[in-house]
């Protein structure tokens, strides 16, 4: 699917907030009415929604807001706007381009989904295929609003497409709770319509399991543990248990050669377009359908090194396997001087030793998970990575299920699901290592397990939010000990990003987020 599915983008979808005020028809451009006529175009319309994942703001900068803004990572980019806005909470420009672009690109995805949901029901076509395509559109509308609720909170809820500029009405804010409710509705309806699995070129499309996993995340962010339990039960003890599993080799979750494996629940499909000259997905024939993320977060002299991991994250891997070896996840997850246990002379960074590149005592750490260093002959990164992003893995699902069971007071039942994650990498089961934990102690253990299993994969900000770290000075002080950037975090302000000021200025119905 990753080679064939996404790469037809239809001009009817390209309305954005930057559209000119004049509404003058172009006789050479396809109209909305003319486009939505048959099953092929319905398919193309859905493909265009998927392609939103290839836009630079989604594929690159959104990861920064989920990861670099958290306590896992930081930036010392020479472009000071990156650390100031994405790391240190020194946000002074509410029109900072990358913040606005993440916001705008999610709304582009929503616009594309709304076009499908408004127009595909009227097409005469196979009803089963129609239901599936509508399910895919609902999934992605839910996903894009999931990002907006996570990062910006109180955003406009737009569920119908404006066909012309004269149809556009200035939206009001919806509360974060209202956005979550719509996301849950979309994902529930998507789960009802989507298949459990695909074959052939359709492998990689969103599935029932992906909808249920994302739905569980939505409920967990609201601490609605009872509601989160239902989709997780489908995934872990229901039909999903025969669909998903953990791959034996942890590293296979991050290699371009082992994509769409049995552990993948929601995977973003990337491919390389050698003629691509932009991070946009709409410039024919130069659409971008790879990801520039490895280039921007790659180690110094390999990539731009615009993001680094804190050393405390590496130190979190403090348990040996039952065979007395180091946790294999640390070497699979990070570039650092002891990525190879024999030290910096033996640690190879894209074909050259760590010592040769940086010196033996350099303590910098970079994320390895999205890299292409395993490809033969690779000496650097680039802007067109074809390495897929496994946004939700089954290991994440198992840890989510354990967390929910614990929050519901069913701690003994939570142990086996953490055991599976630990035993995959050779660690002693939690049942043996720490039997009989209290609910609070198990809660702290889950925090540890999610770091060691999921570091850098884009979940940390929501984890911290869900665990209450942005709601009290006591919890905030814990973050400050791990990440000094949180010294400038202001309670009741920085939990959310500011809405783009340009939108607030032109729309009297839109209210800026609190304390900005």
Image (spheres, rainbow, N blue to C red):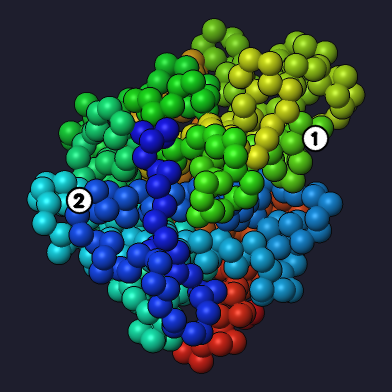
Q: Give the crowd class for mark 2: few <14, some 14-19, many >=20 residues within 10 Å.
A: some
x 15%, y 59%: residue: 123
Please name whichever residue, 452 or 201, is drawn nearer the observer in this view of the structure.
201
* Rendered image quadrant of residue 113: bottom left
Q: Position of residue 425 (x, y in %)?
A: 49, 19
Please name whichever residue, 288 or 342, is drawn nearer the observer in this view of the structure.
288
Instruction: Please state if 133 lies on the left or on the right of 357 as rendered.
Output: left
Disc 1 versus disc 2: distance between alpha carbons?
A: 48 Å
Q: Which mark is residue 39?
A: 2
x 30%, y 68%: residue: 32
Q: Give the crowd class for mark 1: few <14, some 14-19, many >=20 residues within 10 Å.
A: some
- Classify the position of the C terminus by image quarter: bottom right
Q: Position of residue 181 (x, y in %)?
A: 30, 67
The local secondary structure at tag 1 comes to: loop
Q: Position of residue 480 (x, y in %)?
A: 71, 55
Q: Residue furthest front?
A: 27
Q: Is residue 305 above or below residue 338?
A: below
Which residue in the protein does label 1 denote? Answer: 300
Q: Is residue 424 above or below residue 163?
A: above
Instruction: Please state if 503 lies on the left or on the right of 229 as rendered.
Output: right
Please name whichever residue, 323 or 156, is drawn nearer the observer in this view of the structure.
156
For marks 1 and 2 on the same chain, the one whose residue lies earlier in the sequence: 2
Q: Is residue 365 above or below residue 488?
A: above
The local secondary structure at tag 2 comes to: helix
Instruction: Please state if 247 lies on the left or on the right of 500 as rendered.
Output: left
- Badge nearest the viewer, 1 or 2: 2
Q: Is residue 230 visible?
A: no
- Classify the position of the N terminus by image quarter: top left
Q: Is residue 294 visible?
A: yes
x 34%, y 25%: residue: 262
Q: Position of residue 511 (x, y in %)?
A: 52, 85
């Amino acid at each position: 699917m990753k080679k064939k599915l996404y790469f037809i983008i239809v001009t009817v979808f390209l309305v954005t907030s930057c559209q000119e005020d004049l509404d003058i028809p172009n006789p050479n451009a396809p109209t909305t009415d003319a486009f939505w006529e048959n099953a092929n175009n319905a398919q193309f319309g859905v493909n265009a929604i998927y392609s939103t994942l290839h836009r630079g703001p989604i594929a690159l900068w959104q990861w920064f807001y989920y990861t670099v803004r958290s306590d896992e990572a930081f930036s010392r980019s020479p472009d000071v706007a990156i650390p100031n806005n994405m790391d240190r909470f020194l946000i002074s420009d509410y029109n900072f381009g990358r913040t606005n672009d993440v916001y705008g690109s999610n709304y582009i995805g929503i616009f594309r989904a709304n076009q499908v949901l408004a127009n595909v029901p009227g097409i005469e076509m196979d009803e089963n295929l129609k239901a599936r395509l509508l399910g895919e559109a609902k999934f992605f509308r839910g996903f894009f609003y999931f990002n907006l609720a996570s990062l910006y909170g109180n955003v406009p809820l737009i569920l119908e497409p404006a066909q012309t500029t004269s149809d556009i009405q200035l939206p009001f804010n919806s509360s974060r709770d209202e956005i979550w409710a719509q996301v849950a509705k979309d994902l529930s309806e998507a789960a009802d319509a989507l298949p459990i699995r695909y074959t052939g070129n359709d492998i990689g499309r969103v599935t029932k399991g992906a909808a249920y996993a994302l739905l569980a995340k939505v409920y967990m962010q609201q601490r609605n543990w009872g509601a989160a339990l239902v989709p997780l039960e489908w995934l872990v003890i229901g039909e999903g248990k025969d669909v998903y599993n953990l791959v034996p080799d942890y590293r296979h979750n991050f290699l371009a050669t082992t994509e769409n494996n049995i552990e993948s629940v929601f995977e973003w499909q990337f491919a390389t377009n050698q003629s691509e000259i932009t991070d946009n997905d709409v410039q024919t024939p130069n659409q971008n359908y790879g990801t520039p993320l490895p280039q921007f977060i790659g180690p110094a002299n390999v990539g731009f090194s615009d993001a680094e991991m804190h050393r405390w994250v590496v130190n979190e891997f403090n348990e040996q396997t039952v065979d007395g070896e180091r946790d294999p996840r640390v070497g699979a997850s990070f570039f650092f001087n002891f990525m190879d246990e024999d030290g910096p002379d033996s640690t190879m960074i894209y074909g050259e030793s760590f010592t040769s590149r940086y010196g033996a005592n350099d303590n910098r750490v970079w994320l390895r998970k999205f890299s292409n260093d395993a490809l033969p002959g690779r000496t650097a990164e680039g802007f067109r990575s074809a390495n897929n992003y496994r946004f939700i893995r089954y290991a994440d699902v198992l840890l989510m299920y354990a967390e929910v069971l614990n929050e519901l007071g069913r701690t003994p039942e939570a142990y086996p699901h953490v055991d599976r994650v630990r035993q995959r990498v050779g660690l002693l089961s939690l049942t043996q290592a720490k039997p009989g934990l209290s609910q609070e102690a198990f809660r702290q253990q889950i925090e540890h397990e999610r770091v060691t299993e999921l570091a850098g994969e884009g979940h940390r900000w929501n984890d911290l939010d869900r665990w209450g770290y942005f709601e009290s000075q006591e919890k905030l002080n814990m973050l400050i000990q791990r990440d000094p950037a949180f010294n400038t975090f202001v309670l009741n302000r920085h939990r959310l990003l500011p809405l783009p000021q340009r939108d607030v200025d032109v729309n009297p119905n839109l209210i800026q987020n609190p304390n900005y």
